[in-house]
Image (cartoon, rainbow, N blue to C red):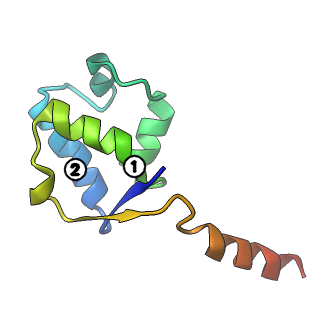
Amino acid sequence: MRRIRFEEREQREFLDLVIEKLNSPSLRGILQFGFVVPYSTLKNYYNELRLLPEGLFNDLCEVARIDKESLDFELVDDNWGKVRGGRVSKRSSI
């Protein structure tokens, strides 16, 4: 599954835009629109600790009626970051 990579702080701005467009009171309020994502995972996306999955990103854009063309993002493969993480891990264990 591919993931969506935003510039720093733009993923949070995207989720803030979704909250605003949906007239949701908070981040947790997004879940009432039928998204099957644990709240803790949603917080990780909001705090930019994890990249958004492409499917969730598309669903959020569709429900909030956000034009994806107006956003600045990059599609990355599922293994993005894993190669570097493996190298760092290997180096530290030697």
Rendered image quadrant of residue 33: top left
Mark 2 neighbour density, 10 Å: few (under 14) some (14–19) many (20 or more): some
Q: Amino acid at mark 1?
A: Leu
Q: Nearer the viewer, mark 1 or mark 2?
A: 1
From the top left corner, tell me how far across and down residue 55 is, in percent: 36, 41
Q: Is residue 9 above or below residue 22?
A: below
- Counting the numbered discs, the total is 2
Rendered image quadrant of residue 83: bottom right
**SS under mark 2:** helix
The residue identified by callout 2 is 14
Rendered image quadrant of residue 21: top left
Residue 52 numbered mark, or none:
1
Mark 1 neighbour density, 10 Å: few (under 14) some (14–19) many (20 or more): many
Q: Upstream in the sequence, badge 1 or badge 2?
A: 2
From the top left corner, tell me how far across and down residue 30 is, in percent: 28, 27
Left or right of 91 on screen, residue 52: left
Left or right of 11 on screen, residue 24: left
**SS under mark 1:** strand
Quadrant of the drawing holding the C terminus? bottom right
From the top left corner, tell me how far across and down residue 90 is, in percent: 81, 77
Residue displayed at 25% across by 29% down: 26
Residue displayed at 27% across by 35% down: 59
Tags 1 and 2 touching, CB below 8 Å: yes
Left or right of 82 on screen, residue 48: left
Residue displayed at 18% across by 26% down: 24
Residue displayed at 11% across by 57% down: 69
Marks 1 and 2, how far apart at CA: 11 Å
Q: Amino acid at mark 2?
A: Phe
